[in-house]
Image: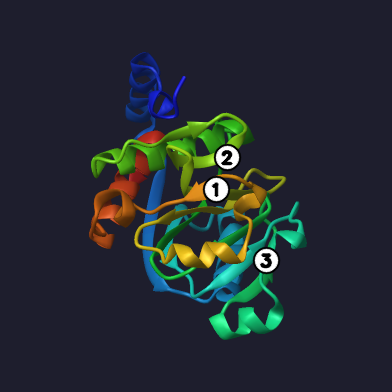
Amino acid sequence: MSAEARARPAASTSRERNTQGAQLATERRLRVQRLGRIAYADALDLQADLVEQRRREQIDDQLLLLEHPHVITLGTSADESHILVANDERDLLGIQIHSTGRGGDVTYHGPGQLVGYPILDLKPDRCDLHRYVRDLEEVLLRALADFGIVAGRIVGHTGVWVGNAKIAAIGVRVSSRWITSHGFALNINTDLRYFDAIVPCGIRGRGVTSMALCLGEPPPREAVCDSIGAHFGVVFERVVV
């Protein structure tokens, strides 16, 4: 089966989730914050603070939408040999390196990406890491479809793909109390040459792409944010505020 054929779940599954969403709509709220460009270290601190507030039930679920300056991040299973540029070349390119607590290997963030950090309490009904990652993919698949981009999944590789090229990466962390952090990075108008500095997510032999490359021009960033926020509310059964 092609990646395109796997882009959408069966219609019955969608109806079931939408019905569940309607039942829970008055119970769970999601605040979407559009934060602009933020240094990676600052975003880590912000996430840690929000995770603690969510654990104490001081805030609703959150979805942070933002952009980072050029940075290579190392997940908990990262292989540093997947960084392909020497320190001096990396410095010339203005790329920082950060270790992080998310799962996964090596990835790149930079201008033109839309990075999403959900801070969600998955209790009591969504305590399933596999389902959580698949639901993040589903949000991105639906958002891309809004712009006419047919994307899909590839068995064995987390993320969202257009053909053989990754358009969105996913790397998450879920605490022992089922509070999420980290999340996804969608290439809107990213300079894809920066991915030459790494083996993206440790996967060799596959490419990367962007919405701008698929469409011939970049879509409005705010429209992409609107789409992701709306689909996040439906897929995760939250009222977006």
Residue 155 in picture, x, y percent from top left: 57, 29
User: Which circle's residue, 2 or 3, is located before the other in the chain?
Assistant: 3
Alpha-carbon distance for marks 2 and 3? 22 Å
User: Does residue 80 show up?
Assistant: yes
- At mark 2, the secondary structure is strand
User: Which circle's residue, 2 or 1, is located before the other in the chain?
Assistant: 2
Seen in the image, is 5 located left or right of residue 170? left
Give the residue type that dot 3 points to.
Leu
- At mark 1, the secondary structure is strand
Q: Residue 84 bears which disc, if any?
A: 3
Q: Residue 158 bears which disc, if any?
A: 2
Residue 92 in picture, x, y percent from top left: 58, 85
Residue 230 in picture, x, y percent from top left: 30, 44
Q: Residues within 10 Å of mark 2 (few under 14, many from 20)?
A: some
User: Which circle's residue, 3 or 1, is located before the other in the chain?
Assistant: 3
Residue sitting at 64 percent across and 64 percent down? 73
Seen in the image, is 165 located left or right of residue 121? left
Give the residue type that dot 2 points to.
Thr
User: Does residue 236 show up?
Assistant: no
Residue sitting at 60 percent across and 66 percent down? 197
Q: Residue 170 bears which disc, if any?
A: 1
- At mark 3, the secondary structure is loop
Closer to the camera, 145 or 20? 145
Residue sitting at 76 percent across and 62 percent down? 80
